[in-house]
Image (spheres, helix red, strand yellow):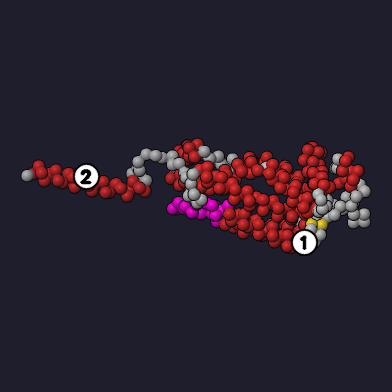
Amino acid sequence: MVELFYTVLYEPLLNGLLLIYTYLPWQDMGIAIIILTIIIKLILFYPNYKALAAQKRLQETQPKLEAIKKKYKNNKEEQGKQLIDFYKKNKVNPFSSCLPLLIQLPILIALYRVFFSGIQIDPDTGLLIQEQIDHLYPFLQGIYSTTPINTTFLGIVELTQNHNIVLAVLAGAAQFISSRLLYSKKAPVKTKGAKDENMTAMINKQMLYFMPLITVVFGYQFPAGVTLYWLTNTLFTLGQQLIMLKMHDKKNGHKDGEPEVVDTQKSAPKADSPMGEEKLPEKTKQLEEQQENNKNEAVK
C-alpha cells in the first residue's frame, strides 16, 4: 500500500515540482511550490466547490433542522421522518460535504509529503539526498544527480529551514480570514430554546480562533517550504470561497445571509404550534361574539 502511494501520488507530484523548477526562467523553488499548488487546486476546484456549497447549504438550514429536532424530541421516529423529508425537499445531504474532501485527501497528503521531505538537500554537496533522487524519473535523475537545487524563495527565505515566523503568521492570518468569511455567511437565525444550535455556534466561534493559532504554531515548527504551501493553499481557497459563494447565492436566487429554505409543513398552523396558540384565542373570541349577536337577534 505504501509503495502504491509513492508510485501513484508522491512520485508524480515530486517530479512535477522539479519539472516546473527546471523550466522556470529563474530557478526558484518557492515559485515552483506556488505554481504546483495552484495547478493542484485548479484540478480539485469542482470537488472543492461541491463541498463548500454543501457546507453552506447545511449552515443555512441548521436553524430549521434544530426547530424540527426540538419539536419532535419526544418522538424519535417522527423526528427521523421529518428530517428525511426536510433533506429531500431542500436537496440537502448531511454527508455531501465530506465525500469530496475524502476524495482529495490522498492527493493533499502526497502534496504535503512532497513539500515536507521531497526537497531534502545534502548540506555538503547541495544536491538532493539519494533517497529522493531514487523517486525521480530517469530524465530528472540525470539532471539532479549532479545539479544543485536553489532552495530559497526570492533569494530571501530558506525553504528547508524551520522557524520562519513571517510565513507562519501570514498563513495563520489567511486561515482566520478564510474561516471568518465562511462562518459570516451563516444566517443569524436562532431557534428559541435550541441548545444544540447554540452549542454548535459556540464551537464554530472557538474554531474560528483556534485553527489560525494552530496554523501559526505548526507553520513555525515546519520547514518554510511546507508553510509556503500552506499559505498559498489558504489564499487560493479564500479566492475560491469568494467565487463559489457568489455562484451559490446567484444559483439559489437569494442574497448573502438570507437562506431560502423550503418548509416541510405547508399546511395552516396547528393549535399546538406557537402561531396556532396565538391565533386560537382570537378566533374563539370572534365565534363567541357572533353567537352572542345571534342570540340577541333571536330575542328581538
Q: Residue at the spot x=49%, y=40% of the render?
A: 90
- Residue 215 in the magenta stretch? The answer is no
Q: Earlier in the sequence, mark 2 or mark 1?
A: 1
Quadrant showing the C terminus: top left
Badge 1 crowding class, 10 Å Cα cut-off, few under 14, some 14 to 19, many 20 or more, is some
Which region shows up in magenta? 182-204
Q: CA distance from mark 2 to mark 1?
A: 78 Å
Provide residue 99's location: percent of width, then percent of height: 63, 40
- Residue 196 in the magenta stretch? The answer is yes
Can residue 73 be seen at all in this image of the molecule? no
Provide residue 246's location: percent of width, then percent of height: 56, 48
Total label count? 2
Q: Residue at the spot x=56%, y=45% of the render?
A: 247
Q: Which residue is mark 1?
A: 163
Element type at mark 1: loop
Name the side, left or right, on which 183 lies relative to 18: left
Dot 2 amino acid type: Leu
Q: Which residue is mark 2?
A: 287
Instruction: Give the answer, above or below, for where 189 lies relative to 291.
Output: below
The quarter of the displayed image where residue 14 is located: top right
